[in-house]
Amino acid sequence: MMFFNKLALSDFRKNAREEKMFLFATIMIYALNIIIHLLQNSVKTLMLQGVNITAQFLVLGEFVIGFFSVIFLIYIHSFLMKSKTKVYGLYYTLGLSRFDLVKISFFAKLWNFIFSMIGGILTGVIFSKAGVLLLGKMLNAHNLTLSIHLQSIMQVILLFSIIFLILLLINIRMIYKISPIALLHAEEIGEKEPKSRWILTVIGFLSLGVGYVISISIQSPIEALFLFFIAALLVIIGTYLLFIVGTIALLKFFKKREKVFYQPRNFISISGMIFRMKQNGTSLANIAVLLTMTLVTLIVSINLSLAADTLSKKLFPKEISLTSSLPKEEYQSLITQEADEAHVSLKSVVNYQMTGMFLGSLKNHVMYPGSMNTFHLMTEEQYAKLEKKSLHLKANQLVILSYGAQFKEDKIQFGKEKYEVCKVIQKIKGLPEGTENIASFIFIVKDEAEIQKISKDYPLINASANKVKQEKGFVSLDTYTLFDLKGSKKDKEKFVKRLYSLPEDKMEVRSKAEYLAYYKGFIAGLLFIGIILGTGFVLAAGLVIYYKQVSEGQADQKNFEILQKVGLSHKEVKKVINIQVFWVFFLPIATTVLHTIFAMPMILKILSAFGLHDIKTLWGFSSGIILGIVVLYYFIYKQTSKAYYKQIKR
């Protein structure tokens, strides 16, 4: 067995460049898994508001990174195996059996596993400390410390044990499936010129087009949330089909155009790319998809993070928001009593009345019973008290205040009752400018009689009890009170605690400070996962580019040597290389930017569900993120291109 172990180590030295890159990739992916597992356990020890949702995001991240690790390592392992096939073929011709080759492969994988485990755990623990500092700052939790649990590390070791077992099985399958001669000459086996598959090309265009149309035609944030993954899947399918078969069809189209094809640079470039585009197409599609996933993840998480304070001001114009269905006198007396006992006073008080929250589903101009939308009902009298002006509404007329949803119809129907929409407004003085509920409305009607006509067919979420129930009788108006507090920080906290201690059937209490804590916990988890996934995807894209450059360099080296021998100058060869490198660089990043631009309408709708409606600001932040990824990609490509040129010059 020691003999096979020595052969495995000898192979590692002979293929040092490929082996080192594979080991580097494995260590980095290993470290990402360690980081996210250790931080998930560290966050659970905190006793802060909003931490639970951060921990849930990290658990989700564990599954995403784990799945990504399996797929990615299997993919880049295929590049490594291509460089080993000739060595295995040579061993076989020298007298080693297939089972002996399996033993060599076993030891090679064993050493890879050991080195990656040691390097991955050490790197993961080191970067976990930096991750703790970053996450602690996001959560404003200065007492967050790194908790290293053996169970978390063992989970990652188990995951990579399974991955390396899969890689070993892939090796064994290759050894027993391919003939010895094929193993020996695997690198020299040429590819037949691929056929133009126009049906698959058309399917690719249709898949991509449908995904784009879904994104740009979405009107509702709820539809955006439901259809996002369908649109993403269609775009991914279209991307792979167009890169794998669409590019070949396009190159063959150019080949048939004599004026284009029979040019020295085009003749060689088009011919070379046709023969290699099937493999290259998959690699380029992988890069485009990985970079698009990176951009979308970062755009959503960074925009939500940057908008935290703005969003809190929209949802909470005052420090405290109270809702109660108690009689007005009893309700006000209760608030005054609690404030006096906590030694605080209320300032900038805003009072208004409207119904609790109804559930419905708005389709076209009809509000059906359902749960896609939420809405409140307010009388014109209450509106006039807040805005100091009247709307002069008549029976079966209303005004709509829309939160996160567009309404362009001139009428709306509730059950059998039809209403004329006089106008759609964006805000009312004193009321929040946003809502936590997706696609929410306030319908302002003439009086309470109109409220009773509308409300009878819709489930009401009782604001005080926070339960869904069907009101079949008279729907009363709840009292909403928004105010700031005057007093010491300790007294303010005491007052809020006293309010929260009241029974739910008396009052619903919402605090701006509490909301910010939960929101920042949500955003911290999302942003951190975005950073982790973004790092993983960019790393993966960089490694895919590197392996593609190296494999292309190995394949193209002999071809360019032949071209130079038949009379092509070094300068002409360099021009041909530059054309190929340019297109291989340009296609993935251009596709990524195009995908992201078409995804932006859907992303903006999803962000509007969280109360972010400033389109110009969102586009500004998003454009900066896109530009940053493009620059980073260019840097990675320039560095990996050196490996290609070095390979060609050998």
Image: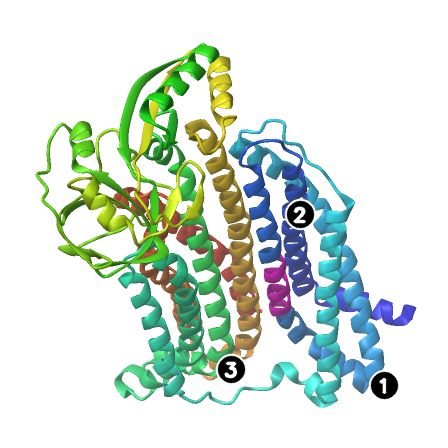
- For label 2, the SS is helix
Q: Position of residue 404 (x, y in %)?
A: 29, 47
- Locate residue 4: give its quadrant: bottom right
Label 3 sits on what residue type?
Ile
- For label 3, the SS is helix
Which disc is residue 37 wearing? 2
Q: Quadrant of the C terminus?
A: bottom right
- For label 1, the SS is loop
Image check: 331 left or right of 565? left
- Identify residue for label 3: 562
Between 41 and 159, the residue placed more toward the observer is 41
Image check: 514 left or right of 90? left
Question: Main SS type for the magenta part?
Answer: helix
Asked if the residues shown at circle 3 and circle 1 are in contact, with their CB atoms under 8 angstroms apart, the answer is: no
Marks 3 and 1 sit apart, C-alpha to C-alpha, by: 34 Å
Question: What residue is shown at x 67% (from left), y 73% (from top)?
Answer: 81
Marks 3 and 2 sit apart, C-alpha to C-alpha, by: 52 Å
- Identify residue for label 1: 95
Residues packed near mark 2 inside 10 Å, few (<14), some (14 to 19) or many (20 plus): many
Question: What residue is shown at x 67% (from left), y 42% (from top)?
Answer: 41
Question: Which numbered disc, 1 or 2, marks the residue closer to the eye?
Answer: 2
Label 2 sits on what residue type?
His
- Locate residue 137: give its quadrant: top right
Which comes sooner in the sequence, label 1 or label 2?
2
Residues packed near mark 3 inside 10 Å, few (<14), some (14 to 19) or many (20 plus): few
Which comes sooner in the sequence, label 3 or label 2?
2
